[in-house]
Image: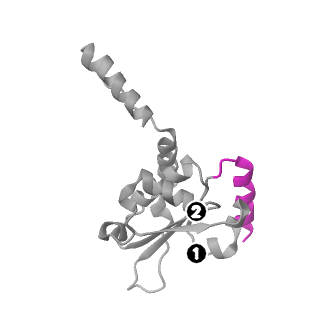
Amino acid sequence: RNTERLVDSLTTTFIHDRKCPGIVTLINPADNLTMQVLSRIPLHEYTAACPSEKESRQLNVLVAGEGAFAQQFVRNAYACGQMADCRFSLTWAATDADRVRSELYAAAPALRDENAEAVKACGELRFHRLDSNAAVADGALVKNMQYVLLAYENDEENIVAARRIRRL
């Protein structure tokens, strides 16, 4: 909020008061990075065909981590996961699942009402509590996932978890 106020203040000072053409904007590095990941590795390429032609395709996404990048990826993936004839499910796994849920709902209040028709139409959003960051490599958790993003703040944890998942 302080950053938004600063941007508003700069906009007023430099554009309106000084009559300068232009705009002052805020760059969100987490949003930029998540959109870069989603454009380089798009969700739609990982949809799984269902066994029956009567069923739609499915896309199950797992995001593991608790930082700003993980939250922004969840928000962007939830929006990008809407595809015709595709059931979408996103699971956010974290050691403090209640905290990340609260923070997500504070940042994106529209997602708070999980029973709202608009939210249901977008897909399923679940939160999974991990005993430890390494627990993300549990075979049961990643079994039916088509897309997994490891977004821990520590690169070593990401590498260890990726190697464990790859061995499953």
Amino acid tagged 2: Ala
Measured along the vertical axis of the image, is residue 131 above or below residue 68?
below
Q: How many marks?
A: 2
For residue 84, say whether it is visible: no
> In the drawing, what numbered circle is on residue 108?
none
The colour scheme used here is one colour
The circle drawn on residue 144 is 1
Given residues 18 and 112, the one toward you in this image is 112
Q: The N terminus appears in which quarter of the rendering?
A: top left
Would you say 166 lies left or right of 49 here? right
Q: Which residues are magenta?
A: 152-168
In magenta segment, residue 6 = no
Q: Quadrant of the C terminus?
A: bottom right
Q: Which SS type dominates the magenta stretch?
A: helix
Residue projecting furthest to the top: 18
Label 2 residue SS: helix
Q: Which residue is mark 2?
A: 97
16 sits left or right of 62 in the view = left
Q: Position of residue 15 (x, y in %)?
A: 28, 19
Neighbours of disc 2 within 10 Å: few (<14), some (14-19), many (20+): some
Query: Disc 1 versus disc 2: distance between alpha carbons?
Result: 20 Å
Instruction: Give whichever of discs 1 and 2 has the lower sequence position.
Output: 2
Q: Secondary structure at mark 1?
A: loop
Q: Quadrant of residue 84?
A: bottom left
User: In the rendered structure, which amino acid carries the disc numbered 1?
Assistant: Asn
User: Which residue is painted at 60% across and 54% down in the image?
Assistant: 66
Q: Position of residue 12 (x, y in %)?
A: 29, 22
